[in-house]
Amino acid sequence: MKNFDLKDLTIFFEGEIYNKNSFLFYDEILLLEDLYLKFGFEFLSKLDGVFAFCIYDKRKNLYFCSRDRFGNIPFYYTIKENKFIFSTSIKDILKELPVLPKINKVAISKYMQYFSTFGEDTFYTDIYKLEEASFIVFEKNKDLIKKRYYKINTYKAINDENRALKDLEELLYSAIEKRLISSPSTLLSGGVDSSTISSIYTKISGKKIDTFSIGYSEYKNYCELDFAKITSKHIGSNHHEVIIDKKTYIDNFYSSLDNFDEPHADSAAIPLNILLKNVKNCGVNKLLSGEGADELFLGYDNYAKFLKYYKFQESLTKEQNDFLEEIVSALQNNTKESEYLRRVVKKQNIYNSFGEVFNDMQKRKLFTKVPTFKSETPKKDFVDNMSYIDIKLWVANPVLTKVYGVSTANSLQIHTPFLDNDILKYIFSVESSIKVGDTNKYLLKKIAQKHIPKEIINRVKKGFNSPFNEWLQSEFGSSILDTILEVNRQTQFFNENYLKHIYSLASSNKFKQHLYSLFIFSLWYKKVYM
């Protein structure tokens, strides 16, 4: 985060404001100065971009800080003895503190359930994260002001599919155009999202763009290079493949974890880091990626499954629900399905996020005492609710934290056209039945038909997966469990027998994300606190 000292203000800023030209400004700092002096705290809804900033008002001796609507760039802060300390990196804040803060147990609970912490919590007590689409105001000897400046509106204004398709395609063109760079490049997985972005980007730029894909020399079931090649050939891109093996993965494992201030359980961070190192070596410094499409356009198979659970809950009479409650109470099953059924009959949130790892039942077995936190209040429309939860819990936290951490470490900027203010606003105004359609990602696939081959649209979704469990088990074996148990014997956070159970399951390639989350946390704790 760079700082700029002006007459009445000092502005600390990182990011890019896409609509600065519409205010007749070509510099973000001068734009922020002008808007703040004219409108005070009320100008944030006018901004379209990716940003985190802090404005220090010299006249009033106050700090005004904010982040963009999705949370692309992090912002952390602490207040010690009336001193306001902030940064985009927790590590920078720790350097300013006389002692290492105690660990925040609520953050551990959030992390174990959702890949990373979220909301205001970080792993350090009294170091807070400013939430996306929010601002804070700090003045000495006054209460800290916290306010959300943007909330997703789910009012349905669009009930015509053809209009929705036309408008969304125009918005996607606009989102890509505002992120246009002189040397167009994209991350290309071979799925609908990145393929559509790459195709439209090629048409808008009028250039032969560079596309980058990753694959694996072993465990080819995880490899999507063949599909990426199909798209690359279709759009005529300069295509670059990065193929990694176990040695490359292990050689980059610890250094990739160091890109993050806190434990981060998305295993895709390591392959992404290896890929971006190669991108940087090609002389590229900015590129586009397809994050956000699954959450906004209902791309996950999980959405259809949970919609069935929801409809089942709606169909139950009181007598049927009471009967099922007796059965569910007797179940001691460890499966996700038994937990979802329990939520149905207990009238709890059925859907908690695509990124849910340890569910409530499993957390009770994992923790010696479960640190609790308030869950999200569900939206009335279940389809909207699934998208909303994933934008807030999954995208704004593990996904964008991963993208920022790894891209920053490689001196790159990744821009995400699907995570566009106008697309976000529009997609939530579309009737849910139109969004659901008859397949996952229904509306986006309809748009994509104009831009990419049918075999990409009709392929089975795989996601950005890797043989992380196979490689880690092969390299570290039982020392994974040893590390977890060593940390736990000092902290006493978890039940040891359940940790051993998780390890035995992961050795058979089950519960592998559960073990990975525990291993990453234990490595971090050992490095920071032991």
Image: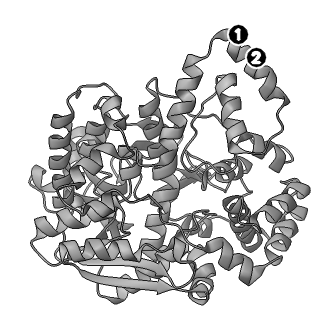
Q: Is residue 139 above or below residue 268?
A: above
Q: Horizontally, is 138 left or right of 123 in the view?
A: left
Query: Which x, y percent locates residue 2?
Result: 36, 68
Query: Which x, y percent locates residue 492?
Result: 88, 56
**Looking at the figure, which quarter contains the N terminus?**
bottom left
**Label 2 Cα neighbours within 10 Å, binned few <14 / some 14-19 / many ≥20:** few
Of the pair 236 and 376, the residue shown nearer to us: 236
Residue at 33% of width from left, 52% of height from top?
Answer: 419
Query: Which x, y percent locates residue 180?
Result: 18, 66
Residue at 74% of width from left, 50% of height from top?
Answer: 105
Residue 468, labelled with which disc?
none
Q: Which element type, helix, strand or loop, lies under badge 1?
A: helix
Query: Which x, y percent locates residue 184?
Result: 21, 74
Residue at 68% of width from left, 40% of height from top?
Answer: 337
Q: Please give the residue where the numbered disc 2 appears in the rendered image.
A: 323
Find residue 37 and report its image quarter: top left
**Label 1 Cα neighbours within 10 Å, binned few <14 / some 14-19 / many ≥20:** few
Of the pair 112 and 203, the residue shown nearer to us: 203
Q: Is residue 57 above or below residue 265?
A: above
Q: How far apart in space, not on screen, are marks 2 and 1 (Cα)? A: 6 Å
Tell me the kind of residue under disc 2: Phe
Q: Please give the residue where the numbered disc 1 appears in the rendered image.
A: 319
- Is residue 370 visible to us here? no
